[in-house]
Amino acid sequence: MQQDAITMQHDANPSARPEQPPDSTSYINRVGIRVPPFWPEKPAVWFAQLEGQLALSNITHVSTIFYYVISQMDNKYAAEVENVITNPPTHSRYDRIKAELIRRRTLSEE
């Protein structure tokens, strides 16, 4: 019922409506997520935590996920996957950096 009142209020007062860009298909809502700090000893667990946060926020675009990953990496670990960061593949860039980090960190721990 309260939702109806809000809708009617917006209909009665057009200036109260939020502005929409002319092409609403290009409109992007930014969603903030809490990305846990990278866990180099257990990268597979870290990726599972990250994917949980992404799922809760309905973030599915591969490029966005890739950039979340690289934004949380310490210089030391970013250097380990420098080739993927500086020259990301056009497709599956998230899958690639995830596989490389898990593989390289697992080898380092052994």
Image (cartoon, rainbow, N blue to C red):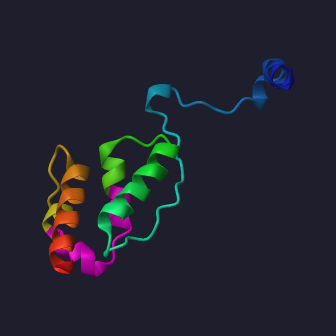
Q: Residue furthest front?
A: 110
Percent x, y of residue 18: 68, 33
Q: Which of the 4 image quadrants contains residue 42?
A: bottom left
Residue 92 lies in the magenta-colored region = no
Percent x, y of residue 30: 52, 46
Camera-side residue of 110 and 57: 110
When the figure is inspected, residue 99 is found, relative to residue 22, above or below; the finding is below
When the figure is inspected, residue 18 is found, relative to residue 103, above or below; the finding is above
Q: Residue at x 38, y 68 (%)?
A: 72
When the figure is inspected, residue 3 is found, relative to residue 84, above or below; the finding is above
Percent x, y of residue 87: 14, 59
Magenta residues span 67-82
When the figure is inspected, residue 28 is found, relative to residue 4, above or below; the finding is below
Q: Which of the 4 image quadrants contains residue 16?
A: top right
Task: For residue 23, say whether it is visible.
Answer: no
* Quadrant assignment for the N terminus: top right
Task: For residue 11, say whether it is visible.
Answer: yes
